[in-house]
Structures are given as structure tokens and as C-alpha cells.
Image (cartoon, rainbow, N blue to C red):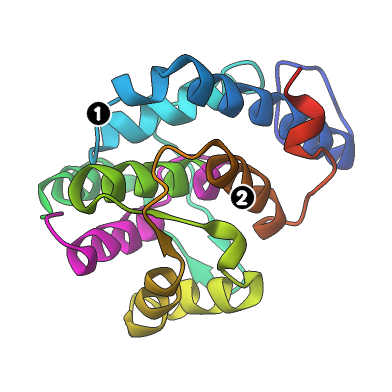
């Protein structure tokens, strides 16, 4: 159970509240244009996204984790070496699709935050794609199970995740609906889909 600013002690209730709060913040990022002010392709930019989304829920929003974490049988980068790993990721090239996805994979392996890595990093990825190749991912076209399996295998073989994401590319880089689908999709990937974006807009 994560300590949170909302004072919630039930994990299911926390998941629901976290989803609602962060979806509202994500919508504001799009509508105000603030997302366009964040750095693109750096850990600083990723931490700016994470802090904005989660600052009303967690004290650690935007901060590098100090704990070692794992998911299923996959252990993410050791907290001891995380800061150096993030510096190396910052230096990775991002001039074409393959380079961008390779950078995305490395950031996923790093998993720099205690919680909320998937949501923040997918937004970070779309920012890089938009700037460098004029495309974004239509996350509604990415099968959840295929995505999770491909990401799990990506440190060894990245062809699967590259294929999945390339098939879902769209040039609708400023389309509100595509962005909103991405917000909903980020929760579907992590097991929650309580609040639909359209219900939170007003």
C-alpha cells in the first residue's frame, strides 16, 4: 500500500482515486498546451510529466525512486545505479522510429518512479515521436496483452514491440480524440478503467 496525500488506505480505492485525479491532470496538460513546454526525450521531461500528473496524489511525484522494484518476473534497474542509467538514456539518439523505440525500451527498463511509470513514459514517447517524425501512437490500436508481452521481451528482442507500435502510428499528432484514447489506454494496460475521459472533461 503506497503512502498517499489523499489519506486512502484501501488499495482499490487508491487506484480509483489515482486514476481520476491523473486523468483530469492529463486532460489539462493537453488543453492548456503545457505539455508542449516540457523537455522532449530527456528524463527531466519525463519527470515533469510525472510530477504534474501525480503531485496531488504522491509526495514522490517526479522524483527518482530509491527502492528496487519488479513486476511479475522482471526486475527493473537497480535503484543504486538508476541515476547513471538515466544519464545514459538521455544521451541515446532519437532521430528515427527505431532509435526512439529503443530509447523507450531503455526507459521502461529503468522504471524511474515508484508508481505511474507506464502512463508517464507513454506520454513521453508520443512527445518524442511527434517532434522527431511527426507521428504519435494511437494506443487504442495496440492490443493490451500483445503490448505487455512484447515489452517484457523487449530487452532481449525488440522487433515485436517495434512492429506493434509502428502499426499503430498516426499522423493525427494534435488530435484531441487520439490523445484522449491514449489516456484511457494507459489505465487499461494497468488494470483500471473506472473513469472514461469523456466523463471527466467538464
Q: Which residues are magenta?
A: 94-119
Location of residue 135 in the rendering, given as x and y in whole percent from the top left corner: 32, 53
State the image coordinates of residue 191 (x, y, percent, origin top left): 75, 56
Quarter of the image where one finds residue 154? bottom left
Which residue: 73% across, 31% down? 18
Q: Is residue 30 visible?
A: yes
Q: Nearer the viewer, residue 173 or 103?
A: 173
Residue 125 versus residue 63 in the image, above or below: below
**Residue 54 appears in which quarter of the rendering?**
top right
Foreground residue among 165 and 133 = 133
**How far apart, in angstroms, are the residues tagged by discs 2 and 1?**
21 Å
Where's residue 77, x and y in %? Answer: 37, 57
Secondary structure of the magenta portion, mostly? helix
Find disc 2 in the rendering and name its residue. Answer: 186
- The residue located at (24%, 45%) in the rendering is 86
- Between 144 and 177, the residue placed more toward the observer is 177
Residue at (50, 22) in percent of width and height: 29
Return the disc, 2 or 1, that comes first in the chain's sequence. Answer: 1
Q: Residues within 10 Å of mark 1 (few under 14, many from 20)?
A: some
- Residue 84 counted in the magenta span: no
Q: Which residue is mark 1?
A: 39
**108 in magenta:** yes
| 88 lies left or right of 139 | left
Amino acid at each position: 500500500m503506497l503512502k498517499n496525500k489523499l489519506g486512502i488506505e484501501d488499495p482499490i480505492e487508491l487506484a480509483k482515486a489515482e486514476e481520476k485525479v491523473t486523468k483530469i491532470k492529463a486532460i489539462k496538460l493537453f488543453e492548456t498546451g503545457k505539455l508542449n513546454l516540457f523537455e522532449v526525450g530527456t528524463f527531466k521531461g519525463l519527470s515533469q510529466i510525472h510530477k504534474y500528473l501525480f503531485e496531488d496524489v504522491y509526495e514522490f511525484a517526479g522524483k527518482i525512486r530509491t527502492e528496487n522494484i519488479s513486476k511479475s518476473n522482471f526486475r527493473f534497474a537497480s535503484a543504486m545505479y538508476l541515476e547513471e542509467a538515466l544519464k545514459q538514456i538521455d544521451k541515446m539518439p532519437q532521430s528515427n522510429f527505431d532509435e526512439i523505440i529503443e530509447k523507450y525500451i531503455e526507459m521502461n527498463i529503468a522504471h524511474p518512479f515508484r508508481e505511474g511509470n507506464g502512463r508517464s513514459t507513454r506520454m513521453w514517447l508520443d512527445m518524442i515521436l511527434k517532434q522527431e517524425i511527426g507521428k504519435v501512437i494511437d494506443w487504442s490500436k495496440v492490443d493490451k496483452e500483445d503490448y505487455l508481452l512484447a515489452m517484457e521481451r523487449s530487452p532481449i528482442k525488440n522487433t515485436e514491440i517495434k512492429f506493434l507500435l509502428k502499426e499503430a502510428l498516426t499522423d493525427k499528432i494534435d488530435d484531441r480524440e487520439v490523445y484522449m484514447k491514449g489516456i484511457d489506454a494507459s489505465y487499461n494496460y494497468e488494470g483500471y478503467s473506472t473513469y472514461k475521459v469523456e466523463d471527466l472533461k467538464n
